[in-house]
């Protein structure tokens, strides 16, 4: 009986080590997550182990919003350390064994270690990288060449520098919404020439129900890169249960937008969507010519949330002594950034438009 218990304990121990230890079983080098193959790979001996697919991975649990403080997890699975950048204020989380000489957000070397905060919960899910560094650099080249007002010299010579793969924090919220609304509906009366001579107004009231699924909020205040939010669109059907293996070799940012503040932001994002949907429903159902004084009151019930990490590549490039930034979605390759502009190309474009407008007006007045 004792032997059986020891055997079971050994199996549990080995399974836990398999999850948290990043050492290669062949050569003892550090293995890292490879987005190209969705596996853990050793760069020295070729060892590779594929991670569970979304179908094989356990479903990421939706946590009840009201009892969140009683259910938060603080264990990231491996020992972590944090650095904070003196220049941009961003904070990143690394494996304890990794070294960080520069900020992954702005490239500054003015970084310093900070104490870990035991009140920060660990993520429940991860959207793994599918775009590797080489692909991200390729996408950058295409993106820059597609900028019609960028100087030709920039398109030919600029290379992205300090491409950093980061797992950034997001809250996602689910909620059943019930909205009561009232509005004035206008029906136009026109004369024989089509001019509006009268508007008959009617009042309508109704109830609108909608389930909100995975309303996403970027959970960082310290990262001010405006292009991150522009590319923060992810396929959550590929979400995996959090494992430290997925962030091996990458930095991860801890959330600085709290759960309650994130929910306030989510409601602000949800409200205009509900308004648009109610407006569309009214138009379809009542077919008014005008909608006026639309008042909506929304109740949010059965609110649940997930705290997840999602992949972003961040880089910068220089042209004429000026630095430009960009962000690339590490799952689907969506890219956003700012690029240099050629004044000559802008002037030529304006001149062409002016000529086209002039020709059009000339033809109209003939």
Image (cartoon, grey):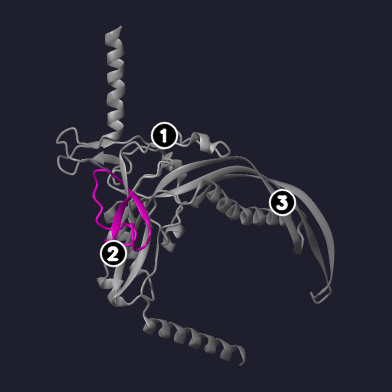
Q: Is residue 6 above or below residue 39?
A: above
Task: Mark 1: give few (<14), some (14-19) or many (20+) Cα within 10 Å.
Answer: few
Q: Which residue is mark 2?
A: 160
- Residue at 38% across, 77% down: 341
Looking at the rendered structure, the secondary structure element under dot 3 is strand
Residue 56 left/right relative to 278: left
Marks 2/1 in contact by CB < 8 Å: the verdict is no
Q: Nearer the viewer, residue 363 or 102?
A: 102
Residue 352 left/right relative to 79: right
- In space, the residues marked 2 and 1 are separated at their CA atoms by 35 Å
Picture quadrant where residue 67 is located = top right
Looking at the rendered structure, the secondary structure element under dot 2 is loop
Q: Which residue is mark 3?
A: 297
Q: Which residue is mark 1?
A: 55
The percent position of residue 192, horizontal first and vertical second, equals 83, 75
Give the quadrant of the N terminus: top left
Residue projecting furthest to the top: 1
- Residue at 30% across, 18% down: 9
Mark 1 or mark 3: name the one nearer the start of the chain.
Answer: 1
Residue 237 left/right relative to 46: right
- In space, the residues marked 1 and 3 are separated at their CA atoms by 39 Å
Q: Nearer the viewer, mark 1 or mark 3?
A: 3
Q: Nearer the viewer, residue 99 or 293?
A: 99
Q: Nearer the viewer, mark 2 or mark 1?
A: 2
Q: Is residue 297 magenta-colored?
A: no
Q: Nearer the viewer, mark 2 or mark 3?
A: 3
Looking at the rendered structure, the secondary structure element under dot 1 is loop
Q: Which residues are magenta?
A: 85-114
Q: How many marks?
A: 3
Mark 2 or mark 3: name the one nearer the start of the chain.
Answer: 2
Mark 2 or mark 1: name the one nearer the start of the chain.
Answer: 1
């Amino acid at each position: 009986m004792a032997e059986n218990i020891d055997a079971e304990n050994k199996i549990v121990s080995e399974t836990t080590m398999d999850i948290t230890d990043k050492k290669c079983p062949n050569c003892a080098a550090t293995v890292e997550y490879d987005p190209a193959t969705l596996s853990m790979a050793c760069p020295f001996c070729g060892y590779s182990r594929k991670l569970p697919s979304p179908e094989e991975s356990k479903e990421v649990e939706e946590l009840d919003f009201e009892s969140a403080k009683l259910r938060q997890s603080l264990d990231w699975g491996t020992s972590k350390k944090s650095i904070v950048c003196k220049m941009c204020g961003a904070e990143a989380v690394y494996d304890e064994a990794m070294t960080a000489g520069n900020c992954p957000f702005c490239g500054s070397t003015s970084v310093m270690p900070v104490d870990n905060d035991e009140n920060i919960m660990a993520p429940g899910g991860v959207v793994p990288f599918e775009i590797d560094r080489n692909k991200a650099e390729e996408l950058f080249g295409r993106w820059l060449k597609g900028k019609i007002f960028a100087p030709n010299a920039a398109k030919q010579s600029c290379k992205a520098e300090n491409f950093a793969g980061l797992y950034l924090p997001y809250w996602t919220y689910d909620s059943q919404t019930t909205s009561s609304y009232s509005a004035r509906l206008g029906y136009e009366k026109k004369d024989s020439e089509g001019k509006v001579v009268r508007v008959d107004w009617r009042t309508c009231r109704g109830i609108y129900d909608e389930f909100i699924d995975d309303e996403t909020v970027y959970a960082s205040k310290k990262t001010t890169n405006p292009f991150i939010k522009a590319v923060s669109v992810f396929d959550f059907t590929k979400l995996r249960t959090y494992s430290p293996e997925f962030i091996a070799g990458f930095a991860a940012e801890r959330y600085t937008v709290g759960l309650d503040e994130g929910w306030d932001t989510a409601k602000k994002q949800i409200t205009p969507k509900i308004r648009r949907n109610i407006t569309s429903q009214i138009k379809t159902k009542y077919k008014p010519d005008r909608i006026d004084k639309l008042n909506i009151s929304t109740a949010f019930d059965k609110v649940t949330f997930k705290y997840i990490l999602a992949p972003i590549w961040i880089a910068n490039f220089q042209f004429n002594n000026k630095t430009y930034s960009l962000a690339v979605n590490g799952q689907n390759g969506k890219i956003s950034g700012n690029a240099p502009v050629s004044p000559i190309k802008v002037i030529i474009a304006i001149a062409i438009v002016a000529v086209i407008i002039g020709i059009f007006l000339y033809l109209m007045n003939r």
